[in-house]
Amino acid sequence: MTVRCISPIDGSVYFEQQTLSLEKAQSAAERAKSAQSNWAARSLEERIELVKAGIAKIGNMIDEIVPELARQMGRPIRYGGEFAGFEERALYMADIAHSSLAPIIIEDSPRFRRVIKRVAHGVVLVIAPWNYPYMTAINSIAPALIAGNAVVLKHASQTPLVGIRLAKAFTSVGIPAEIFQNLVLDHQTTAQLISSSAFDFINFTGSVRGGKAIEMAAVGTFTGLGLELGGKDPGYVMDDADLETAVETLIDGAMFNSGQCCCGIERIYVAESLFDTFVEKAVQIVQAYKLGNPLDTATTLGPMAQERIANEVRSQTDEAVAAGATRLISPSLFPQDGGAYLMPQILTNVDHSMRVMREESFGPVVGIMPVKDDTTAIALMNDSSFGLTASLWTQDPKRAESIADQIATGTVFMNRADYLDPALCWTGCKDTGRGGSLSLIGYHNLTRPKSYHLKKA
C-alpha cells in the first residue's frame, strides 16, 4: 500500500511511501523488544544526554522543517516550525527525570530494604497526529526514551517527513536504530500489531473514532493506553475580565493554525455586560487576517490540512446558520475561500442544539454566546462530551478556582488559553480520553512500579 501526503497548498502529491508488510512490521517490533533491556541498562544520565542531543539536531534542521510543514499541513511559515515548544517540553522532561524516576525508599535499615522503583514498560508505540506533529510526538518520545523504553513511532500520513526527521535526528546522535524506529504502517497492520501484544504501552493522539479502534485492537492484551482524542474547549469571559486581552487571546486560540489545535478555543461564553463589545473587537481581529498560501510570509491563515476537514467545518457552519445563527464575517473579505482554504468565521445567535457548539469543529470557526451568570456558564461549559481545557477570564483567582473545580475538564486556564505547560499533566476526561503526558505523571504513565522487599537478616 502507498501512503500519499497530499499538499493542501495545491492538491499535489508532496510525498509518498510504501507501508510495511505485517511481517516486516512484526520484525521491527521484535528488534525493539530485544534491544530495549540494553537501553534500559544504560545510565539515566546517558539516556538524558542522548535525548537532549537529538533535540538539538532537530533545531539544526529548522530552516528545512518550516517550509516542509507548510507543504504538508498548511501552517504559514511566518509562525516557524514548533521548535520552541518542542524544545521546552523535551528539556523540561529531561530536567525532572532524576526526581521523577527516583526510587521511593520506604525503609533501608539493618534488617530490611523496602523500595519502589519505576521500571520501563518495554516498547512504547507513539501514534502522532499531523496538526502539531513535532510537539505532540515529543510529549511521549522524550520521556519514553529517557525512562528506558524503546519507541516505535507511527506518524500521521499527512506529515510523514516529521517521522523521518525525528528518527534521523535521534539515531544520528547515538540512540540505537532498534530503540527509535519510525514505521510506516496502515491501519490494519497497526491493529494487528496491537492485538498481538507487540507493544507494552501505546500513546495515541487523534480522533475519538481512532481511539476506539485502538481500544478494540488492544482488548484482552492488557496493553496500557494513553489517549488524547480532541476537545470542544470553552472560554468564559466574566464581567470583571481584562476585555482587550481576553478578546485577543481567545480569538487567536480559536483561529491559530486554522483552528486545528487540540486545545483550541471552539466556543466562547461572555458576560452579558461585555458581550457586544467583545464581539465587535473579535470581528475586527478576524477581518484583518490574510488567508492564502502558507509559503507567503504575509499569510496569517493557511489552508486546512485536508479539504474534507474544511468541508466538515463548512457543514457545521451552514447547519448553524440554517438554524438561526448569524455569520459576522463577510465572504467578500476572503475571496480565496474554497477547497482546503477555509475563511474564518464568527457566529452569534448560537445555542447548544447546533453541532458547531457541541461537536469538535477543528477549524477556524467559533460560536459566541452571552451568559447571565457563573452558574449558567458552568452548565454550558460542561454541556459537552469532551473535556480537555477551559479558559476562564477574571481578575479574581478565587472565583476562577471555584468555577474550575466545577468544570469537567483536564486543564483549566485563568487569563490565558491554548498553552501546554510541561510541568503540568496534559490530560483529559470524557471523550477526550484517558491517561496523561508530560510532568511527573507523564513519567509514571510511561513506567510501571516495581516493589523490592529485601530482608537482610
Image (cartoon, rainbow, N blue to C red):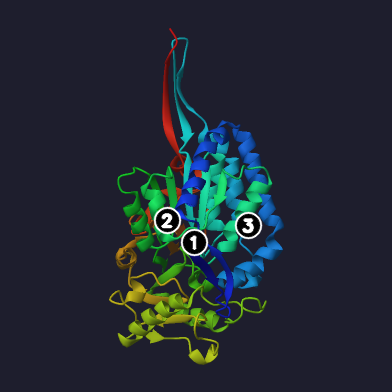
The three-letter amino acid code for the residue at tag 1 is: Pro
Name the mark on residue 281: none
Q: Real-space Cα distance between discs 3 and 1?
A: 15 Å
Q: Which residue has dot 3 on it?
A: 165
The image quarter in which residue 319 lies: bottom left
Residue marked by disc 1:
129
Disc 3 or disc 2, which is closer to the eye? Answer: 2
Q: Can you identify the residue that label 2 sits on?
A: 189
For label 2, the SS is helix
Q: Is residue 363 left or right of residue 5?
A: left
Identify residue type, mark 2.
Answer: Thr
Q: Residue at x 47, y 10 (%)?
A: 110
Find residue 279 and report its image quarter: bottom left
User: Do the residues under discs 1 and 2 have CB atoms within 8 angstroms?
Assistant: no
Disc 3 or disc 1, which is closer to the eye? 3
- Residue type, numbered disc 3: Arg
- Image coordinates of residue 39 in percent, x first then y, are 57, 36
Looking at the rendered image, the disc whose residue lies closer to the viewer, 1 or 2, is 2
Q: Is 38 drawn above or below residue 152 in the view shown?
A: above
For the residues marked 3 and 2, what is the alpha-carbon distance in whole angstroms? Answer: 23 Å
Tell me the quarter of the picture where residue 70 sits: bottom right
Nearer-N-terminus badge (3/2)? 3
Which label's residue is closer to the chain start, 1 or 2?
1
Q: Are marks 3 and 1 in contact (CB under 8 Å)?
A: no
Q: Which element is circle 3 on?
A: helix
